[in-house]
Image (spheres, rainbow, N blue to C red):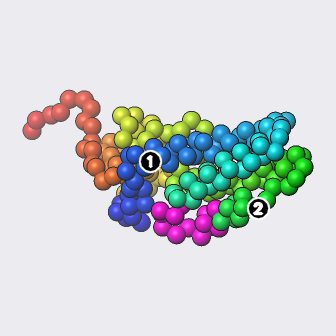
Amino acid sequence: MNLRTLTATRRTPRHRQAAVRAAVVAARETCELLLAEGASVVKSDQDVRDLRLRLRRHLKQLGAVVGARPARPRLSGLVETARRSTAQTPPAGLGEAQAYLRRLAEEVKAVLAEMGRCGLVCVHRRECPPAHAPDQAAAKIRTVFPDIGCRLLCNGVLSFDDTGVLAPDGRVYPPRRTGPTRLL
């Protein structure tokens, strides 16, 4: 794998990255709400409709991220399965409807997990800083490439052993020199 391949998979404009992060955070919050132990958020038919629509909206946003990237059959399959599930009519009883919504939340959670595994989104509990942030190097290491002396961070930044940085948008930051320099 070369550097061009590594950075090409993560080139996304800043405003798009912010939208993706917002969509992921919202989807996670909805899933946590529905999957919380002992939580009964479904109190009426209106709650069922609202939560089902919210999950559909999350899938639409996540599906747009998946569709904009190179083909990933497993991820596309998970998104399609979840979309089909949200298209189904929810059961009539509140208990069955809550089980239906929990199943949908599990499917959305599986999509998020696979997106994290593919490197499309940050899966860390405390989200890594974006590539354009001043503290971009604080992101978690996703992959180490010892043969070329760099690490791919969760935010798409390539951090080199000499402290140089290659941002996902193609910008290059030269190595930071620490300590005194000697003149020859």
x then y, percent, for residue 1: 42, 66
- Left or right, 167 with respect to 106, comes to left
Task: Check disc 2 and give the amino acid type.
Answer: Gln
Q: Residue at x 53, y 42 (%)?
A: 22
State which quarter of the image contains the C terminus: top left
x then y, percent, for residue 155: 45, 46
x then y, percent, for residue 173: 27, 44
Sequence-first tag of 2 and 1: 1
Of residues 160 and 18, the one nearer the viewer is 18
- Left or right, 180 with respect to 38, comes to left
Q: Residues within 10 Å of mark 1 (few under 14, many from 20)?
A: some
Q: Tell me if residue 44 can be seen.
A: yes
Q: Closer to the observer: label 2 or label 1? A: 2
86 versus 130 height, above or below? below
- The residue that label 1 is drawn on is 17
Q: Is residue 49 magenta?
A: no
Task: Check disc 1 and give the amino acid type.
Answer: Gln
Element type at marker 1? Answer: helix
72 versus 157 height, above or below? below
Q: Residues within 10 Å of mark 2 (few under 14, many from 20)?
A: few
Q: Tell me if residue 122 can be seen.
A: no
Of residues 2 and 183, the one nearer the viewer is 2
The residue range painted magenta reads 66-79
- The residue that label 2 is drawn on is 88
| Count of numbered badges drawn on the protein | 2
x then y, percent, for residue 31: 70, 44
Tell me the quarter of the picture where residue 89 sits: bottom right
